[in-house]
Image (spheres, coloured by chain):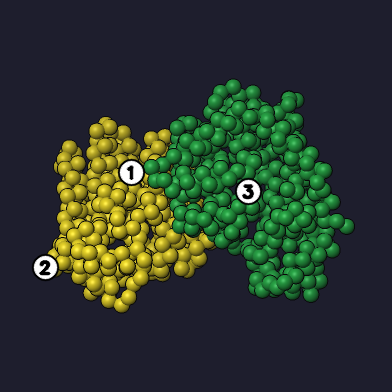
Chain colours: A green, B yellow
């Protein structure tokens, strides 16, 4: 069967529309966030706004800050604190990307040359540090210890997740549990924090803050699961996207975990050679995808993502119906079904 | 004349005794700090305490946290908040070292193999990030927005200083002012913050907090000036220490700035070849030291350090006489005269 059954263009377009709809609902706030991002990246050291601007302006969908804005709106918040905090969330994300690109020695990010390829590893590490610190300065100006606690904890957890990922890389013994622990920490924790902040600024009851956190956490897990599937996606390849980055680095993501477990000894030898020894040859990536397809590893990874998407959906149940609630629900489909 | 006139062993031993005397006065608190450093570095991801422990336990004199403890004692503070905050200061310093070692590709730190040489660049960047985040978590537990503001600002300024240093590296046009801006940001800012925290926890008047900050800032500038001189020190070489690290990397420190400015065109060609083009040959380091000696560049750099030491001394004038005050004054001599 086609591994891309869950990822066909029509569904994904619907998903992408869902994200556009969510963004439209927070458009004014998002403009304010973008202004804050530019103004707070200012430094007399020119390389900082230069490099920071390169990666922040480079774009992405601003999914994480959009979640903060949407969560605040879902909570009926009428103030303006959410925009600075959404900018913090994006700064923390950007800092992580900068450090991630350095450590992964990756050459490409969002189809552009990565910041470290253009500016060098040194600058990427140090500008990442600056963005971390600047994010915390913005939080201190906001003045809420709850906000600081949430984002400090998230930052520590993210770093732990990245270190944990290091220790699972090239290790085909990695379990599904260990993989989940990594993606919860390195990706889902910031989604969770981004959403929780909306409930914090709106001063909603703890149960609602926890629900927002749960929505973000489960959405984030689904997001990373699908992201890891896309790196082996035939649709992506047909769209001209680079695939196989994780494979070349020996990152043990769920599709590999499942294919390895379900494979015979000869297949496991293949995985050990390519992922542990990084002894890779022409045709290995295609063979890896064929093995994943044979064992439904990509399909089942997306099924796991659907499970977390369903949990995210239920987490929002307690909030009254509204356009923003429906947009947040629809974005789950975007995350699970995207193939761009 | 001997470039090391200010750095002879006898004076330095006196200085080192001064540091020991200061440490003795805060010994109980420092034990508590060391316990906090170990316990707060805990993570279920084993590589984190492993690598963090390697560099934190690796030692150094804990000069920065000692300054926090001493400043609190100078202010007559009777509580216990200073130990956790001193641990934060050491975490921030350690995180900076980890990132600095990565970006400098240096192989040695305090005579041991640097953490990145042992654990790899990836782990050093990510464990550094973890220590940053953990430091902020500890501050949030302390609960003072003033503390958070001071250390967030310090972190942003340090990162800016490190980036600025990148842009001056290999640039023989670097001015003394630009060099000073770099060392104020990358080194002295944390000394200033470490001292200021003592006044914050003791809730002393703003003028005393500012005086402590000034003491730390000027002590930190003197410290870095001398540190940069030591990298060209014949005494260091005779003691078997590695010298010339900055030279090999093309870092434009004050001795280079002065020797370049004071040199003739042939000498400037030498500096451009070695520091800008990094085209270095056998005997170049020795020639660099000879040129610095000819132009009194090392001696005058230490004289500049003495100037900042004198400002630091006057900053403490407003505090009543006490053993801790005298120890803080004596430590200025240690910083200016050390040659270890």
Circle 1 is placed at which residue position? B193
Determine the image quadrant of residue A207: top right
Q: Chain of mark 1?
A: B
Provide residue A43's location: percent of width, then percent of height.
Answer: 41, 42
Residue positioned 74% across, 74% down in the render: A269
Furthest toward the front, the residue is B265
Circle 3 Cα neighbour tier, 10 Å, few/some/many (<14 / 14–19 / ≥20): many
SS for callout 3: helix
Q: Please state, as top left, top right, bottom left or bottom right, where the C terminus of chain B lies in the image.
A: bottom left
Circle 1 Cα neighbour tier, 10 Å, few/some/many (<14 / 14–19 / ≥20): many
- The number of numbered discs placed on residues in the rendered structure image is 3
Provide residue B31's location: percent of width, then percent of height.
Answer: 35, 54
State the residue in front, A55 or A84: A55
Q: Chain of mark 2?
A: B
Determine the image quadrant of residue B99: bottom left
Q: Chain of mark 3?
A: A
Circle 2 Cα neighbour tier, 10 Å, few/some/many (<14 / 14–19 / ≥20): few
Provide residue A266's location: percent of width, then percent of height.
Answer: 79, 75
State the residue in front, A74 or A98: A98
Furthest toward the right, the residue is A1
Circle 2 is placed at which residue position? B1
Position of B36 compared to A226: left or right?
Answer: left
Residue positioned 80% across, 65% down in the render: A291
**A151 w.r.t. B327: above or below:** above
Circle 3 is placed at which residue position? A187
Report the disc number at residue B27: none
**What is the spatial separation of the Cα atoms under label 2 and label 1, in whole angstroms?**
38 Å
Residue positioned 43% across, 48% down in the render: A47
């Amino acid at each position: 069967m086609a591994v891309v059954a869950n990822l066909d263009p029509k569904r994904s377009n619907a998903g992408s529309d869902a994200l556009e709809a969510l963004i439209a609902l927070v458009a004014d706030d998002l403009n304010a966030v973008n202004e804050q991002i530019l103004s707070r990246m200012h430094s007399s050291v020119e390389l900082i706004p230069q490099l920071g601007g390169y990666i922040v302006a480079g774009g992405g969908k601003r999914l994480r800050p959009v979640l903060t804005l949407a969560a605040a709106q879902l909570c009926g918040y009428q103030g303006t604190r959410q925009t600075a905090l959404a900018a913090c969330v994006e700064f923390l994300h950007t800092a992580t990307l900068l450090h991630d690109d350095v450590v992964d020695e990756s050459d490409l990010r969002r189809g552009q040359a990565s910041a470290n390829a253009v500016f060098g590893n040194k600058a990427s590490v140090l500008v990442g540090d600056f963005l971390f610190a600047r994010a915390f300065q913005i939080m201190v100006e906001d003045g809420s210890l709850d906000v600081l606690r949430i984002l400090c904890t998230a930052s520590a957890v993210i770093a732990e997740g990245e270190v944990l990922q290091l220790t699972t890389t090239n290790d085909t013994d990695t379990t599904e549990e260990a993989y989940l622990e990594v993606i919860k920490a390195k990706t889902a924790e910031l989604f969770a924090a981004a959403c929780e902040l909306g409930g914090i600024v709106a001063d909603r009851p703890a149960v609602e803050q926890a629900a927002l956190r749960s929505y973000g956490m489960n959405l984030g897990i689904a997001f990373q699961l699908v992201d890891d599937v896309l790196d082996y996606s035939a649709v992506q390849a047909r769209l001209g996207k680079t695939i196989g980055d994780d494979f070349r680095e020996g990152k043990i993501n769920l599709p590999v975990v499942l294919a390895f477990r379900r494979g015979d000894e000869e297949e496991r030898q293949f995985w050990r050679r390519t992922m542990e020894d990084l002894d890779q040859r022409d045709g290995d990536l295609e063979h890896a995808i064929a093995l994943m397809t044979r064992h439904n590893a990509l399909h089942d990874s997306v099924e796991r993502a659907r499970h977390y998407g369903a949990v995210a959906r239920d987490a929002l149940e307690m909030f009254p119906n509204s356009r923003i609630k429906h947009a947040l629900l629809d974005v789950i489909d975007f995350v699970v079904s995207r193939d761009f």
